[in-house]
Structure formats: structure tokens, C-alpha cells
Image: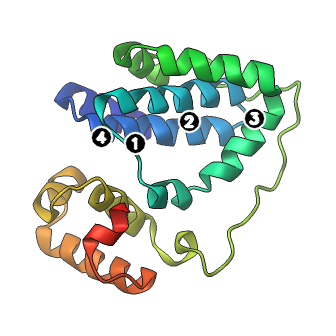
Amino acid sequence: MSREALRLVWELDIKVIIQYSLFRLAGVAASQGQPVRAARLWGAVEGMEAYGVHLSPIALSFIDYEGRLSVARSQLGEEAWSAAWAEGKTMPLEQAVEYALSEEEHKPLTLIPVPEQQPQPVADEPTERLTAREQEVTLLVAQGLSNRRIAQELSISEHTVANHVRRILKKLGLRSRAQLSS
């Protein structure tokens, strides 16, 4: 699903969602024991900051970014990790998208064992309390999209988006949408 979303937003040239799609695909690669692919894609995400596109800290916390990064980095070693990261960071955006959509490195590595259990978030963390759809809405709100735009992106009604936003703010103990992007 993330690859199809990337194809669509690439055609529409929506840089924020392209970045988010690359970010998600890097997370998928990391969870499938593909640390080189994960490092290159996360590097490409960082390279997109040249476009003025940044993922908010709340977006990073939703997927246990630091935990996944640490596991993938430990599977490669610092030198190999840094090389793959740098390669991704310097990829032109078109090349990064092609790489993300390619079949390259889609099989898990067999030389390095992948831990069977990833660290589980504490029950009080937002990832436990928000549904998958609420997490998607949160990421889009954090990127500054209006309810109308979010509704278009997710193919749902504006009323449904407003309900999601209301529940998200309540669950996270926030007072405004602006707090989601800080």
C-alpha cells in the first residue's frame, strides 16, 4: 500500500507525502531485516529537507523511529550504516523514489539475525492510544494540511476528518492542531 501511495503522490508532486511515503517504506525495510535499504531510504528522507520538508517529532514518535533506527544500525555496523545513509541523502529525489519502488533488497538479510521482538511501546504512549487512521490524520495535520485537504488525501469526508482530529486532540491531551506539529 505504501508503494502505491508513493506512486500516486510522485505523479501529483506532493513533496510532504512523498517524504512520508519514503519514511514509511524505510520503516518497512528495517522491520523486514533490510538495514541497507532502510538506511538509504531514511537518508533520502533527510535529504528532502533541502525542499523545506520536515517530519515533526510527533510523527517520528509514532513509529518508534529511534528504536527502528537503532536496530537497523546495529545490524550493519557504523561504517556501513553511515555509507548507506550518505548514499541515500545525496540521491536525487527521482532516484530515491525509483529505489523505493524497486524490488532491490526486498528479501530479508540472512547473515545477520533479526531480533524476533521489537521493543513494545509503553501502553500510555500515543501509538497505543491512536488508531492507524488517527495516526495517518495526525501526520497530515502535523504537516499543515487542512481538513479539506486531509479528506481528499485519505478519501474520507471532512466531517470524518474533524471527528478524527477532535479524538486525537483529546487522546493526546492537546488543545489545538498547532500543537501536533511542534
Tell me residue 103's x, y (percent).
54, 19
Tell me residue 16's x, y (percent).
30, 40
Number of the label disc, if any, that sits on residue 20 = 1
Q: Identify the residue position indicated by label 3 in the image.
A: 73
Going by the numbered disc 3, the residue's amino acid type is Arg
Tell me residue 24's x, y (percent).
49, 42
| Label 2 CA crowd tier, 10 Å (few <14, some 14–19, many 20+) | many
Give the structural element (helix, strand or loop) at label 4. Answer: helix
Q: CA distance from mark 3 to mark 1?
A: 20 Å
Q: Image check: 33 left or right of 54?
A: right
Instruction: Say if mark 1 contacts mark 4, CB within 8 Å.
Output: yes
Q: Quadrant of the image for the C terminus?
A: bottom left
Give the structural element (helix, strand or loop) at label 3. Answer: helix
Which of marks 1 and 3 precedes in the sequence? 1
Give the structural element (helix, strand or loop) at label 1. Answer: helix
Q: Identify the residue position indicated by label 2 in the image.
A: 26
What residue appears at the point 55 percent right and 33 percent down from the top-left corner? 42
Q: Identify the residue position indicated by label 4 in the image.
A: 16
Give the structural element (helix, strand or loop) at label 2. Answer: helix
Which circle, 3 or 2, is nearer the viewer?
3
